[in-house]
Amino acid sequence: MDLSFLQISPGRALAPAVDWLNAHFHGVFAAIGRGVEAALSALEFVLLVLPAPAVIAIAALAVFFLIGWRLAVLIAACLGFVLLMGLWRETMQAIALVTVAVILSVAIAFPLGVLAARRPKVEAVLRPVLDIMQTVPPWVYLIPAVMIFGLGRVPAIMATIIYGIPPMLRLTTLAFRQVPVAFRELGAAIGASPRAVLFRIEIPTAMPTLLVGLNQCILLSLAMVVLAGLVGAGGLGAEVTRGLTRMEMGLGLRAGLAIVAVALLMDRLSRGILQQGRDKGGKS
Amino acid sequence: MNESRAEVLVDCQSLWKIFGDKTEAAIRAVSERGATKADVLQQFNCVVGVSGASLQVRRGEIFCIMGLSGSGKSTLIRMLNRLIDPSLGKVLVKGEDLSRLDTARLREMRARHIGMVFQSVALLPNRTVLENAGFGLEVQGVPRAERNAAARASLAKVGLSEWLDRYPSELSGGMQQRVGLARALTSDPEIILMDEPFSALDPLIRRQLQDEFRQLTKELGKSAVFITHDLDEAIRIGDRIAIMKDGAIIQTGTAEEIILNPADQYVADFVAGISRVHLVKAHSVMIPVAEFRHQHPDIALDTLPAAAPDADVAALIGQITEAAQGAVAVVDQGQAVGVITMRNLLLSLREAPAAQGGDHG
Ligand SMILES: Nc1ncnc2c1ncn2[C@@H]1O[C@H](COP(=O)(O)OP(=O)(O)O)[C@@H](O)[C@H]1O
Ligand SMILES: [Mg+2]
């Protein structure tokens, strides 16, 4: 495939489009930006208001009671590691960024994924769009995002969302396709409303696959958040960028290892929840 | 008989279901010029799932629909609760035309009056046996305590009281299907639709479930439409049986009627291997009293042992071999209505040549 085509020609068409959007919908974008900023700040505040050891203890205890001791130990180890590295604040910022980005990705991808599973035409339209979203190199998203939202955390989140949507959307569609016909028939036969069918039959049945999608969405978002350090999003990405631009091997390495720790933490945590869902559902 | 006077709960009148792209033209061809299944396939490239099926299910009756795979049974039963909309024809449930119900009323009809049990059971894997059995009430918004009580009661009826907190994956196939039945019973519907519920089970378990199902349905006074591809099962369970072939019902009647008077060669071949000794009853074997008197003027009727009109051939064989005169009187409400001789009995066991005439279907 000729990727250079994708990068050059649409860019020429896209730049005026972005300008036009900026000119006419500035208010909308500003409002979105403020909302995202507020959510981020709130989450960061929660993560940073307590001293780090207290946060680690709370997280480990919660995981211990909800999932199991192995995962609790792992979580404590990962968080303890970043604390010792002296990157606590940056790590919490990165976690806040990823969390907000994932929530927004899911909020967009889930309904679209369900719609695509129900209407083949919607899926036919979405599929090429998703293909493009996944093939374009991720930092390319940063350019229009910065053009619209300026530098900072908001464009980083926007680019991250765009990157996180495709896996979540695809797996949502797959998950809903996999719900056995007999279950939907059961819903109709007992006189369930479409809402009851969605919430009591389809979502619970689709849950394992949905959680796989969530896991992928989280990991891809984390990768993107690191990249977003380039546009001043702060957090661990900023440290990596700093290490890179100043050629500070030590800083770059520390930040890199902290990112690995966060990735490990988020991956295992979402898998732990996934496993929990499976166990509850029996071995079927 | 009793059942013929009972209220008709489900009445379907010349139902058609046509699948394909050009169904409208196909339906017009059927209704205006009586096109057949073959015509429809050839001219419109549409598959006819059900063609011109009519049946009546009465209160308290178990109505079996028997046919080979692809004969349209699943399509037909799904039109009885409008999971599938008929292309042509009408379904009346408790006197109400299903096609005229709006979404809310149709949902209520399904929730309260028509239960359904599936071949695939369709138990939700993330719910316990108790939660599955109460699922119908749950989606109707019945409070937890109330629906759990109802679910417990119906699970007790199918013998699963010890398994309430297990998950479906921990149960055997037979037990899962019992949960499916309990789920249908929990909402206390008058009519239960069963689409080959026992087809995937081992023969032994299957037999047990057939007997339990029949007993339970009769005890609770429910009506059921029961689909099967197995004639033995239909005979064991059904009060009446409809035989389907290529989307059409080719004969409806009791097992006895179908065996004694198969509508065509197809039905005759089907019933050929079925043992008659428990199916054929005294009233279809006996000869009129006058005829017996004429043949045997020397034998006094009141010296013969008496049998009921619905005594089966197995019982009659027992009685007649004990009787000195080699004959049994059939007595209904103190009146001799006919006589059965050894010769009549032997004739009843001989398989009738197919399509010997007579009225059926
Ligand atoms: N949704 C459908 N689209 C097209 N053809 C169908 C559909 N459902 C059933 N059929 C066809 O209708 C016929 C009857 O099917 P079905 O009612 O499932 O039979 P049975 O339950 O007796 O095995 C079959 O030829 C089948 O291929
Ligand atoms: Mg079928």
Image (cartoon, coloured by chain):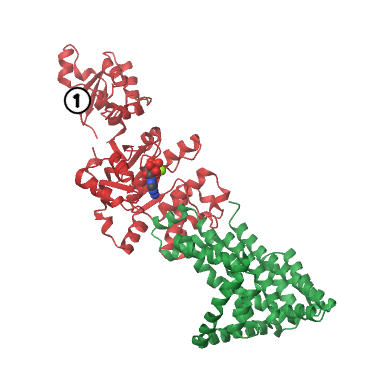
Chain colours: A green, B red
Q: Is residue B216 visible?
A: no
Subunit that carries the residue with mark 1: B
Residue B242 quadrant: top left
Which residue corresponds to mark 1?
B336
Q: Amino acid at mark 1?
A: Ala
The reply, left or right, for residue B182 in relation to residue A220 is left
Tell me where residue A107 appears, x and y as whole percent.
54, 72
Q: Position of residue B156 (x, y in %)?
A: 47, 50
Q: Nearer the viewer, residue B76 or B217?
A: B76
Q: Nearer the viewer, residue A233 or B61?
A: A233
- Could one spot residue B347 in this view of the protein? yes
- Pick whichever, B5 or B93, lies toward us: B93
Question: Label 1 CB, ligand 1: below 8 Å?
Answer: no
- Residue at 65%, 70% (x, y): give it: A137
Q: Is residue A79 left or right of residue B19?
A: right
Q: Position of residue A268 (x, y in %)?
A: 70, 65
Picture coordinates of residue A259, whole percent (x, y) = 75, 72
Q: Which secondary structure, mark 1?
A: strand
